[in-house]
Amino acid sequence: MKILSVFNNKGGVGKTTLTYHLAHSLAQLGHKVLLLDADPQCNLTIYSIPVNKIHQIWERENDCVELGIEEFRKNRTQKDMAALLSQPRSLHFLLQPTIDGAGEFEKLPPPYKINKNLHIVPGRLSIHEYEEKISTRWSDAYRGDALAIRTITRMRGIAEEYSKNFRYDYVIIDTSPSLGALNKTIISTVDGFFVPAAPDMFSLYGIRNIGNSLRKWHEEFEIIYKLISSEKRKLFPKKFVSFLGYTIYNARKYTKASMKWNLAQAHLKYALEIPNVIHNYIGEDLRVDISDELLAEPIGGESIMHGHNTFPTLAQHYRVPMWEIPNVSGIDKDHQNTINGQKPDIYATREKYAVFSQSLISRINSIG
């Protein structure tokens, strides 16, 4: 099992759309996948679960999140708690015992099943409360405080516990574009991450910011690791995160002449700078598993590089991956002409994501 994240300090690069379709593609290739939505905006949750179901999940746990776990438990019988834990719960709910410094739940709630091979632990808008606890407890981790160590490793712990119970091949944690405390602990304790980048100046600076932050985070985690006991080290990954590479996403295609990656000139200019920015700002210690020559090439080549017109919007509307849109029952009249006229292109997205997924898997298999 590998724990992964898709991350960029620059928002608006299609990160959630990419994560959603990557997960579906991996599942259709026969891998068992779990999504953890750690983005306070909850876009991946909204993409994956009907709104009325999200409301039901959140409503039943409101008191726990708002009152705290101890107060919540006082007013619940064992039967009540068992019933609550027998249904999917949000990531914030799972983190509440750590937030409050209380004992963990008696059992792990089941994930929400998107399909047979793809499950999700939904997000919740209030997960910022967990980030606040990370910030206030961070300094205590240097002296090996048990609650502080638990706080900065709990997200990985949840991923590992679910994997043990449900035998996932991949756990993918969705994150916000922030470089704050929450993403600091997530990105630093997953096995690998990759960057979706728009071919523009802002994504280049986003990668620079990620590299600068990762250098500082690595130094801090190394210090903590050296100061704590061998037993507490088991809560951390065996080594700091590996960089898996980048993909250019939602770029304009150039069709008039042969250009590298079939990108329009304005986009190609920035795309060609990405490998140099990676080499200069993503530390060599994060790149040891994959050669610089391979990291210079986008994951999956051109497979998902170019824009998909309105397909991602339709996919989100119907809560299915793009390639399944034509098979949805009850398509809105406003969408029928668009879908019927572009079926070959819509269906083709499945193979494109399969190519991307297999390329990513080969890189994941390279990391120790």
Image (cartoon, rainbow, N blue to C red):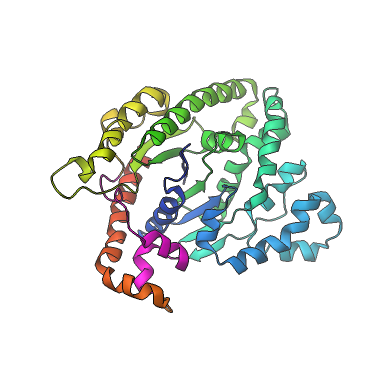
Q: Quadrant of the C terminus?
A: top left
In this rendering, position of residue 6 left or right of residue 336: right
Image coords of residue 6 (percent x, y): 45, 43
Image coords of residue 239 (percent x, y): 49, 30
* Residue at 55% across, 37% down: 178
User: Which stretch did the figure color magenta?
Assistant: 300-328
Image coords of residue 59 (percent x, y): 71, 63
In this rendering, position of residue 332 left or right of residue 141: left
Height in image: 241 above or below 307? above
- The mark tally for this picture is 0
Which quadrant holds residue 292?
Answer: top left
Q: Is residue 316 part of the magenta span, yes or no?
A: yes
Which quadrant holds residue 64?
Answer: bottom right
Task: Work out which residue is located at the far left of the displayed protein and give it.
Answer: 257
* Residue at 71% across, 31% down: 137
Q: Is 303 or 154 nearer to us in this picture?
A: 303
In this rendering, position of residue 232 left or right of residue 24: right
Height in image: 161 above or below 193? below
Height in image: 15 above or below 213? below
Image coords of residue 105 (percent x, y): 72, 52
Task: Work out which residue is located at the far right of the displayed protein and give it.
Answer: 74
* Residue at 71% across, 37% down: 133
Q: Is residue 203 visible?
A: yes
Q: Is residue 116 visible?
A: no
Which quadrant holds residue 27?
Answer: bottom left
Q: Is residue 324 part of the magenta span, yes or no?
A: yes
